[in-house]
Amino acid sequence: MRLIRWFLIAALVLAGGIAIYQLLGASPPEVPFAKVQRGDLASTVVTNGQVEPLDGAEVRSAAGGRVVQVLVSQGQQVNSGAPLLRVDDAEAQTALRDAQSALLAAEARLLEAIAGGNPLHRKELEGSLGEAKLTLQQAQDEAAKLRRLVEAKAATARELELEERRVAVAQERVNSVSAQLEALLSDADREDARAAVAAARARAEAANRRVSETVARSPATGTLYEFPMKAGAWLQPGEFLGRVGDLQILRILVYVDEPELGRIREGLAVSIRWDALPGVTWKGLVDRLPTRIQTFGTRQVGEVVCRIQNPDGNLLPGANVNAEILSAQATGALVVPKQAIRRRLGEEGVWKLEGTALRWQPVRVGITSVTQAEVQEGLQESESVALLVDRELRDGLKVQPTYP
């Protein structure tokens, strides 16, 4: 009897467990859902890039030697041709004086080689030529002094312009008197003397250029955004001195990963942000597509060139920036969370709620953002689609929908 009683108790416990299991198993599982809604959607390519001036130029030294004076400072606005620094020109000035003396001597020999003409008239012209040359020499010396004063901002450009006009008038006088003298004289050694004068004049011009090259000048108008020069530094001919460029319009080299390049085209809007100035955004456009793929760290990227406006000049060349390119946008589109889109049997679709059961619904997806996707076909507004859940879903499965 006792054995039978225990058997009956065990049977009742088992039956109760089965009943409870069936009751619990009959409850549909909870599945999170979201409503299909209309909204605006933007598809962007988010990456990084580096800032460069759109129109920039390198500053280089034409002459070598010790820097004796730095005339500007980094960050200063300069015009094309503005003097930036001066290299010791003592040797160049000595060479120029020697070349000018040689030229005067060659011109004197030319006069000595010439014979004929009215002696009295010739003597008068020779005196006039001497006076004209003296006047020319004095004007040239004064112009050279004024040029140095202008560079040191101790004289005005107008004063220099007037003195250079005096030099031109004096030179014309020398040329005129020389031509009159030459017309009076014979051809006896004239060609050799004339060749010697031409050679001496070429040497003088070369020496004058060498003096002018001791002053480094800006190759363009803009901001001298890189110029670490100091007095006392030693330079080699052609040595890099700095960079100058217009910082109002900048070029951004944006590094786009190879798989994303198909979404990029010229004219797309781009937004630039710089961690050094949080909250500030610069706007621009894609200006040029890449011509090759290159390795950038561990990435394979194309270098997309963007052009942006920088009216305040606060975005600096060389800065590493964050870039967001607007590749596509849709207004009033049917939008679902991106996690609702699944792939089943080779097609994209969603699990749609019909009543209390699931049904697989193929869809055609348009543009996507980081969190949302546009549905172009397959769904209607206000329908419910299942979100990502940690269980297998199937057609006809009864569910208990929940909404965020």
Image (spheres, rainbow, N blue to C red):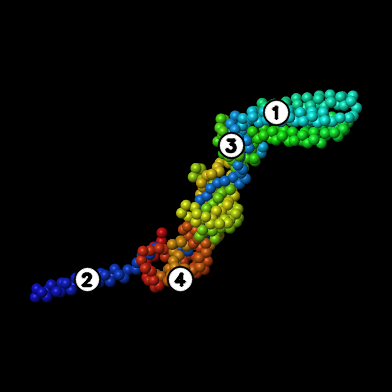
Q: Earlier in the sequence, mark 1 or mark 3?
A: 1
Callout 2: few (<14), some (14-19), or many (20+) C-alpha neighbours within 10 Å? few
Residue contact at pointers 3 and 4, CB within 8 angstroms: no
Q: CA distance from mark 4 to mark 2?
A: 45 Å
Q: Nearer the viewer, residue 259 or 388?
A: 259
Residue 397 sits in quarter: bottom left
Callout 4: few (<14), some (14-19), or many (20+) C-alpha neighbours within 10 Å? few
Kindly identify which numbered label has been placed on residue 16: 2
Three-letter code, disc 4: Gly
Instruction: Please tell me whether mark 4 sits on a helix, a strand or a loop.
Output: loop
Q: CA distance from mark 3 to mark 4?
A: 67 Å
Q: Is residue 14 above or below residue 226?
A: below
What residue is shown with label 4? 346
Q: Nearer the viewer, residue 206 or 383?
A: 206
Q: Seen from this angle, which residue lies furthest front?
A: 188
What residue is shown with label 3? 236
Q: Nearer the viewer, residue 83 or 52?
A: 83
1 vs 4, front mark: 1
2 vs 3, front mark: 3
Instruction: Please tell me whether mark 3 sits on a helix, a strand or a loop.
Output: loop
Q: Earlier in the sequence, mark 3 or mark 4?
A: 3
